[in-house]
Structure formats: structure tokens, C-alpha cells
Image (spheres, rainbow, N blue to C red):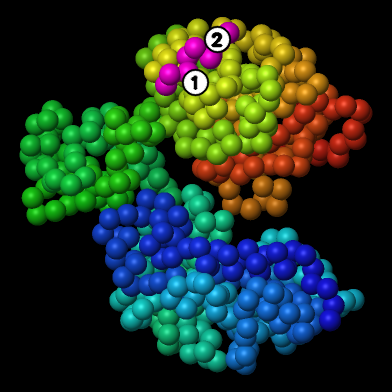
Amino acid sequence: MTATPPDDATHLRATADFVREHDTATLLPLLLPGLDGPELRSMAEHCRFAHAALLFLPPDDETLRAELASCGMDFDATPQPSVVVRRRLAERHGRDEADLDVTILRPSVPGAPEERTVEIFALTVPPGSDLADLAAHEREHRHESHLAFEVRHPDPLALRGLCALLARHGAAPDGGGYNPHEDATVLYFTAPTSSRTGYRRVELNAAGNHAGVLADHQGGDSAHRSAEALLHLLTGAWTTQALAVSARLGLPDALDIRTATDPQQLARTLDAHPQSLATLLRYLTMLGVVTKHHDGYRLTGLGALLRADTPGSMRPLALMYGGPFYQSFAALDHTVRTGEAAFDHLFGENHFDHFARDPELAATFDQSMAASSRMFDPVPAHPAVTAAAEALRPGTVVDIAGGNGELLGRILTAHPRLHGTLLERPHAVEAARGRLDALGCGDRADYVTGDFADVPAGADVYVLSRVLHDWDDTRCAEILRHCARAMPAHADLLIIERVLPADGSTSLATAWDLHMMANTGGRERRADHYAHLLADAGLHLLDDTTPLPLGATVLHARKATAALPHPAYAPEAAQPAQGV
């Protein structure tokens, strides 16, 4: 028996643990954020979480069975030939399907309810095989890893309804097929970027041959489907404005989740034109923001995020994306043609200076930054923060350009021995002071009004949260040098940003890269790009990156104790080098 590559064995155990720890009711909202209420109940009634899948590439059959046994999974049934995954592998790697003997095993996971399984697509890759490159690529990218939901009583109507529900919540068709060996139709989707499961693909598995549904899923009338998809993309601005207008009107604040409100009464409350408001409500119903009932409209859980009084309210984001940032995106062509930020071109100054002249707008911007604060949930537990909190001498955390103190407040609340310092503009400092006082940790906080050159020296942990993406490389290098000068030898620097994937895969960072280019002249970056900027400032990027909610990442850096070599960073062809 040949030793199993560590990645395969670890992945198998992690997949089995995932199956054991999740059920349908808890998994669906993680897979499709925003799915709640009647839609969640309907989907849970029509399908169940059946298995998690992975491609396993053992050197021989004996090794595969030994690894299954080590996970407590015995499998005596005859493996079934794969049709869909074998075809996908052949297409992806330019191989003949006949050369890829992919089989399917579904061993039960001990301790998992409802007889859930791990679905293993097994392809033997002996040492020295010409499949070695294929195996290395698949282990790195895990294209075939997915979550599968078994449709309880499959019929065309139910299947089409489930497909529409997945699409409505951001999942996109990603192929599928019919396996005659199992008499089952599989429909694959890419998970929405907001999914919090760690899996990028999802499968609907329906017993029987559902050729019509499969043809539609795969693009039976491709021209019609392409035109419909493009039309949906082109009208995305309508959605932005509908959400922003409802937030400005106070519509979510005037509705209740449990009790319906008559639309005529709602129009009077909002001082809105009844017929026009009715049209807006129909559109918001389509978006899942409100639901219509016989006695009026109710707010959904999704819509409740736009209420002003909701913890972590996203109302300020709606006002910004439907306000000044919406206006600046109309000048995106100027940015693409010239490289100048559209915001600067439209308003005649950068957005920081523009907001500074308008206190109300500045407050909304700071609140919009705090609206994404759920990404901060894991930060107080970061090892660098915990180590500072548990030191014999209480440590100090400096939040550089820390806005209204949302992140610093979370850190100080979680660690009562820590002290904090917030560096910000004058109006933001006052907002942060009020926030930290309200949280009961104001007596452990200091405030510095100033610029990046004023980073306080001598602290234990420094935090740059969503700061560097505002600036080009020249300015980023300058900011990092200010940090390095202030940091003692033992200090940690935590950088919170959306990091562009090195493999170009789908990511929220891709969208934010466009947003930063148009509105600040900044950019999102790959990890190797940050490593280069840090090294030039005398700092070293460590390997312990930490994923955060909403597509963010914590990068961890320390002072370089010696001249550590760093890989040369090469900007992408379409992105001219900035500064370094």
C-alpha cells in the first residue's frame, strides 16, 4: 500500500466532519444567505442535505479503502461508474474520457443523521502516472468538491422551482447530466459569493431522467438564456436604486416582519405617491425585500437589514451605493480611459476631502463602513490580539484610520485588560469616543487626531482595516513605512482587506477592485502583492492568513529581523505598476 498524499487524507476527514456536523435546516441559510421564512421552509421540505463530495486521487484501491477505514467509513458496495465528473475532468484537462476511470463511492458517515454520506469520485493515480499533473491541479483547486441536496419527490415543476430559488439567491448553473448507471439527474450550481459553507458548488440530485429540466439548466435555448442573463445584468442599476430609495424613504422602518401593513396606509406614512409606491413594492417583492399578503406587505429578514435600528444595519451602505458612489460609477469610462478616479473627476476632489466638507455625508460614510462590521466577528480571537491581551503587562492595540471605533470597540470589549488607541480625522474621533464610552471601554481608549504620519509608537498590535485598498502602491508603501517606524520589534501588524485570489477565481474582491479604482484610485491586491509592499517597508508577511466573513482576510505581518528575500511581484498585464 502506498502512502496517501496528505491533502487527500486531510480533505476526506474534513469532508466527513462537515457531513457529521450539519443538517438541512442549518446548512441552507449558510449556503444561500438571505434565504429565510417561507422560502427556507419550502426548500427544506422539497430537498435534504444528502452528502458532501470530493475527488479522491489514491495511488491504489487498497489505499483508498484504508483511508475510508481510518475515518470509520466501511464500503462494501460495488462502485458505480461516473459519467458527469469523468466528462468534466476530460474537458478541463483535454483528456480522452476513456482514459479516466472515475468511479463513485458513497460510504455512510458514522454519527451523521439521516444516513448522510460522503460522495467520493475516485480516480487512481499510481506513482509516475501521466495523470500526475491532473491530480496536482485538482488537489489545489478542488473543482469537484460540492454539497448535494437530494430532491425528495422529484417532478419537473418541483425541480424548476428549486432551480429558480437557487438562482434568485445568487447560485448560477454549472452543468450537470444524467447517470444511467444510477438513474439519476444531477444539476450543478456555483454557490453565491456570499455563501459561508466553504464550498463553491452545490448539486441537486433527482432520481430519474429529467431531460427537459436538464436541457434548460444546461442552456437548451442558449441565445434566449444569454439574452435574459445579460438583460438581468444590465438592469442591476435598477435594483441599487430601488434599495437606496426604499432606505431613504424609511420604508423598511415603516414595515414589520410579523404584521402586514396596508399599502395605502404605508403611502400616507411615507408621504409617497400611492401608485408609484405600489410599483416599487412589487419590485421589492421580486427582490425578496418584502412579501405581499392579503392584508398588505411585510418586511423579510433580508429587508430588515435596511432598517435604521437593526444592529449592523446596511442602510448606510444603500445610501452610499445609491448616492455618491452611484453617481461616480456613471463616469467609470473616464477611469478606464485615463486612470483617474471617476469620483475625483466628477466631484473635483477625492472622496475623503469631499466627505470632510459635508458632515452629514461623512457620518453616513463612516456608518457604511461599520455596516460591514460582521466581517470583524472573528478578529478579537486572532492569536496576535489574544497574546497581547494575556501578556503580563496589558497590551495596547492601535487601530489606524479606525473610523467610528467599531472594530476597536469589539476588541476592547472581548479583552477587558487591553488598552486601545484610535487614530482618525477629528469628526471620526468624536464619533468613536461616543461609541467606546457607550460600550463601557472608553476608559481604556486613547484618541489621536492626525494622519498616517502620526501612528503612535510602542504598541503591541497595529491594525489597518480596509485602509490600504484606498490607495495606490506609492501611498501604501508610505503608510506601511509609518507603521514599521512605530512598531517595536515584538509588535504585530494585522491588515484586513479583501484579497484577490491568486488563481483568478470568483471573489467579492474582484468587484471591490473595480469599486476602489472608480472611487478612490486604489485597488484590491493579491497576497503576493501585499508581501512585496510589506517587504519594501521592512516588514514580513507571515503565512497564517485568516479568512473573515464577507470575503475579507486578515493578513499578519511583523518586522523583518533580517533581509528576508521575497518573491518578485509582477503586476498583471492590464494593470500598470504603481509606485513599486
Residue 389 is situated, as x and y percent measured from the top left of the image, at 62, 27
- Spatial distance from mark 2 to mark 1, Cα to Cα? 10 Å
528 up-or-down from 435: above or below: below
Res 323 → quadrant: top left
- Residue 127 vs residue 280, the one in the foreground: 127
Q: Is label 2 in a helix, a strand or a loop?
A: strand
Q: Quadrant of residue 63?
A: bottom right
The magenta stretch spans residue 161: no
Q: Pick the residue in front: 287 or 145.
A: 145
Q: Nearer the viewer, residue 128 or 446?
A: 446
**For residue 25, above or below residue 451:** below
Residue linked to disc 1:
405
In the image, the segment drawn in magenta is: 439-448
Q: Secondary structure at mark 1?
A: loop
Quadrant of the drawing holding the C terminus: top right
Q: Is residue 363 left or right of residue 486?
A: left
- Give x and y (percent) for residue 390: 65, 28
> Which residue occupies 49% across, 53% down?
195
Q: Which residue is drawn at the image coordinates 29% and 42% (left, top)? A: 303
Residue position for label 2: 447
